[in-house]
Image (cartoon, rainbow, N blue to C red):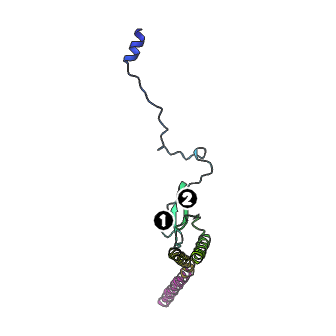
Amino acid sequence: STAKREAQKSRTVKMLPKAKRDYIVDDRPSQRKKGSTSCNVALTKAKYENIPGTRVQSAAGGRHVRVVIQDGKSFDPSNVSGARRHLKKLAEEAAELARIHGGEARNALAKTAAEAASKASNQRPLAKAKSRKLKKERKRQHQDKSKNSVQEAS
């Protein structure tokens, strides 16, 4: 029929429905994923304490996570004691494996793990000592300034 021929002649549009635009930011609570909390604070250097053998990085959802490089276990970045404890446990396990198997590769692994654990455990007291020393110096400078201002006033 003529209707069929006319329909065949006209161009038919074969389009799939398009996805919703993802560049529209919708911050309403009803539009957020359940159970996810996003952290809008940027990760900067010296925000968290440095521990040898770990790395602080951004995880899914913008959270910050401290990751142990050796095995990939993640901790909260402010959980310094937990990360140090885990590094110490890894060093002990590596030393035990080296003692049992006695291979050179295992010895090297045990040595590096032990070094990382010892650095991690020794770093904190040094940092505290440095901060105490800085505080004392600042206090002395402040006292010297106050003495000078009192002497100038009299």
- In the rendered image, the residue lying farthest to the left is 9
Q: Dot 2 lies on which element?
A: loop
What amino acid type is highlighted by mark number 1? Answer: Thr
Numbered mark located on residue 44 in the image: 1
Vertical comparison of 96 with 17: above or below: below
Q: Residue at x 59, y 54 (%)?
A: 37
Q: Dot 1 lies on which element?
A: loop
Q: Is residue 87 magenta?
A: no
Vertical comparison of 148 with 80: above or below: below
Q: Please state if 73 lies on the left or on the right of 153 as rendered.
A: right
In the rendered image, residue 154, in percent from the top left (x then y), is placed at: 50, 91
In the rendered image, residue 72, in percent from the top left (x then y), is placed at: 55, 64
Which of 131/49 is in front?
49
Residue matched to label 2: 63
Q: Residue at x 41, y 23 (%)?
A: 12
Give the CA separation, mark 1 to mark 2.
13 Å
What span is colored magenta in the figure? 127-154
Q: Residue at x 39, y 14 (%)?
A: 6
Q: Residues within 10 Å of mark 2 (few under 14, many from 20)?
A: some
What amino acid type is highlighted by mark number 2? Answer: Arg
